Amino acid sequence: MNYIWQHKYWPQFSYDSSKLSALAYQYAKQASQLSGRLSQTDDGDSITAQLDLMVDEAIHTSLIEGESLNPASVRSSLQNYLNLSPTPINVADVKAEGMAALLVDVRKHFNEPLNKEVLFNWHRMVLAGFEDNILHSDLTVGQWRDSPEPMQIVSGPVGYERVHYEAPAAQDVDALMAEFLSWFNQQESRQIPGVIRAGIAHLWFEVVHPFDDGNGRIGRAIIEYALAQDLGMPVVLSMSTHIEKNKKEYYRQLNTASCCDVSELEDPDVLDITEWLSWFIETLIAAQQEAAGKVATIFEKTAFWQKHKNTELSERQKMVLNKVFKAGKEGFPNGISAQKYAALGKCSKATATRDLSDLLAKNCLRSEGVGRGLRYFIALASAT
């Protein structure tokens, strides 16, 4: 197996603009509409929407790499870094704090050039807490990798490993990253459609694989950095949430775009990354649509409680309604039953039935079906 960084014309990427222009336009149009909608809404709703998406990104970019973070710790850390009132938590999570610091840094400084000092700082954030783990004690943190051993992505048991990818030698990383950063910061690269530039940047970074660990999370932060530079403001989406749902395809696409046969090392078509960029943009569009749904739910929640601010409800009823809102459109696509209400409200089924009848009478809920098939949905203005 050979790799595109060994190619004669590396890194002279090419792509078919005619095959990508419609996708790039669709992404840019959606991004503008979603950002515009947030900018025109109540500050509280806008902050809630963006905070929710940042929590999603922190959690799922880590999950892609097999690292689980506590959502409450992530949210509290983000609120702290954004100078919002942090949600009290019982135990501090250093890893959650590190990911929160990274996402906030991306949002605050996206208009500044990207350089290795920024990347080194991001690396320290991503690997916060790892220095205390004996399994990771040999990692080089806040610097390019420097091990003489090959940086390989492998799978399989010891003795039967399969090498999926081998990155350039550590001694070449500084020069390769200097070339990448020069391209990223050039005005010429900024003239490429933003979503295409982000796709190129992510692939290029992952091919070089400059760090001992954390390359995926930093590479996905670079996506957000590039998209924010194009949009002129932080993006309103969580690409990692969408990638994590189908990460096998994500890795397959990266692997296909990164590898080649020895016979292709002088074939310029190998550096045509149209297929990679097409998948990348389609994934971003899907992530953006998912974000739009989440934003819409937040707005609906605000409108609902504004409408019912004087409606007399019990604390249990309010709690259950908020749980349903929090679950979003995907949480209860078929509504909730009395049994589900009882579980959410931690009450008996008889109490749940009384609560539901009361909420129905007060126009907080609408119902569908009869008998055991009776289901309740929040009565939203958009559904009337």
Image: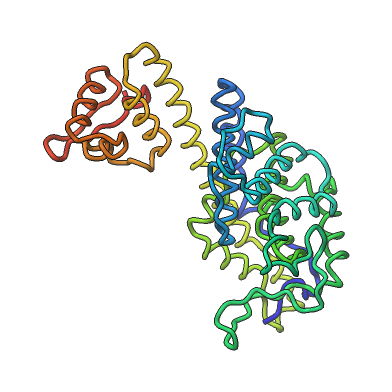
Q: Can residue 218 be seen in this snapshot?
A: no
Query: Which is more toward the observer, 357 or 376?
Result: 357
Q: Is residue 353 above or below residue 130?
A: above
- In-front residue for pair 31/120: 120
- In the image, is residue 358 above or below residue 372? above
Drawn side of residue 378 relative to residue 135, left or right: left
Residue at image position (59%, 29%) is 47
Question: What's the residue at 75%, 70% (across, down)?
Answer: 138
Q: Quadrant of the N terminus?
A: bottom right
Please say which color scheme the image uses. Answer: rainbow
Residue 75 % position (x, y): 58, 39
The image shows residue 171 at horizontal and vertical percentages of 86, 72
Residue 173 spot, x, y in % from top left: 83, 67
Left or right side of 212 for 66: left
Judged left or right of residue 294, residue 251 is: right
Residue at (22% x, 39% y) in the render: 339
Judged from this view, the residue extending furthest toward the bottom is 159
Left or right of 332 in this view: 234 = right
Q: Is residue 179 above or below residue 59?
A: below
Residue at screen point 62% across, 76% down: 154
In the rendered image, the quadrant that contains the C terminus is: top left
Q: Is residue 13 above or below residue 60?
A: below
Q: Residue furthest front?
A: 90
**In front: 139, or 49?**
139
